[in-house]
Amino acid sequence: MSPKVLIKLSLIVNYMVFAVLLNSVGAVILQVQRTFDVSKADASVLEGFKDLPIAIFSFIVASFLPKVGLKKGMLGALFLVAAICFAMPIMANEFWYFKLLFAAVGVSFAVIKVSVFAMIGLVTDNTKEHSSLMSTIEGFFMVGVLVGNVFFSLFVNDADPTSQSWLTIYWYLGGMTLAAALLLFWARINESESKRENTRAWDEFLDMLKLVIRPLVLVFAASAFLFVLIEQSFMTWTPTFYLDVLKVPASMGIQAGAVLAGALAIGRLMAGIILKRMHWLTFTLSCTVLVGVCVALTLPLTTELPEVTETITWFNAPFVVYLFPILGLFLAPIYPTINSVVLSALPRYMQSSMSGLIVVFSALGGTTGSIITGHIFEAYGGTNAFYFSLIPITALCLVLILLNRKVKKNVPS
């Protein structure tokens, strides 16, 4: 196996590991409601404990990581998460332990995501190759989400909501994290192009702050924030939506999150092929509009569900149960595409700093989306909570058009 192939494989595996950990928040939100009698509004803060450390820590470390070493940073993050996972089955008997878990995962993912995004530029030679690898890695991220949701559903006790047996899954997640660290350890990565010679880490941090005032970056920030707000609203609350609105068992609700993730994975992997033949703006605009169409067509079906006289399974579920995850196919390609467009417009030595900003904007969007959705869900019901997504979907269309104009000009100030 060539060094570049091993590096790419390591990036994919590390990203998949954190896909499982990060996006288990939807399943955990559902389970802490059942096991520890936590309200929806209170459970929604888990997204904040995950995303705010991502935002804060990535903003701090993005300019320093190249100096310390991208690989070293990733290994440290993996070992921290493995330790927390191994402690969970023993210690997690109250809600605050889950806040601690997601805070640790958030801090670690900040390091992983900044490093992975910076390394993509080190192993690709042109914009199309960059976009293709970005979409592929993000596609496998969604594969990790799919696998994680299915895996979580196997540990859920539908008959006993208070059972804590599902916590044993963290033994397996800890082992998986250590395996990812071992693969990364063997990958040989030349990080020289990610560093600027004769510059202090503080100066690079100031340069990252200066990036924020660029019109290109400001418009991108709005697009990333809006997209992740939309995506995390669906990803985090789908298991609860299926349980409360569609009246399916808890394990099936978590599996529905896996189906949505599978649609996202397919969409992102297909995007790696389509983007070689289609302009990114045409593609992302079409996808955004189709997401809105899916929401508008599927949610009305939730108000006309037939009377349930037996336990719902995948073999006798209402049509909307299968229809809703289709929106993932169209939602999927938008995020990696806009990330790649902005990163490709910047020199390689600036891509680590920009990656940090991407993580910040994404984390803030994810937290905002999840908390808003959680509160609307509790106050007005799940259907109205998902109808709310039509507002940021419309705003995202407008921002994507503006982003294209800024990318063409690439105004430096």
Image: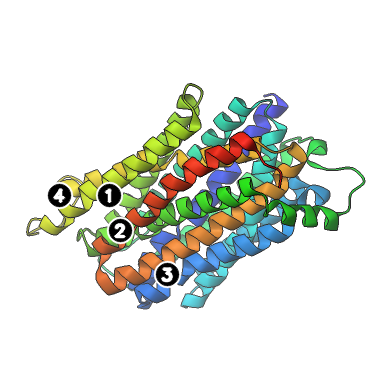
- Estimate the x, y position of residue 331 in percent, counting from the top left: 39, 43
Question: Which residue corresponds to mark 4?
Answer: 318
Q: What is the quadrant of residue 82 in the picture?
A: bottom right
Query: Do the numbered discs 1 and 2 sit on residues whose CB atoms are within 8 Å?
Result: yes
Question: Which mark lies nearer to you, 1 or 3?
Answer: 1
Q: CA distance from mark 4 to mark 1?
A: 17 Å
Q: Earlier in the sequence, mark 2 or mark 3?
A: 3
User: Which label belongs to residue 99?
Assistant: none
Numbered disc 2: secondary structure: helix
Residue 35 in the image: above or below residue 225 = below
- Estimate the x, y position of residue 222 in percent, counting from the top left: 53, 53
Numbered disc 3: secondary structure: loop
Q: Earlier in the sequence, mark 2 or mark 4?
A: 4
Query: Do the numbered discs 1 and 3 sit on residues whose CB atoms are within 8 Å?
Result: no
Q: CA distance from mark 2 to mark 3?
A: 15 Å
Question: Which residue corresponds to mark 2?
Answer: 386
In the rendered view, does 109 fall on the left or right side of 190? left
Q: Which amino acid, mark 4?
A: Pro
Question: Which residue corresponds to mark 1?
Answer: 295
Q: Which amino acid, mark 1?
A: Val
Q: Which amino acid, mark 3?
A: Ser
In the rendered view, does 207 fall on the left or right side of 132? right
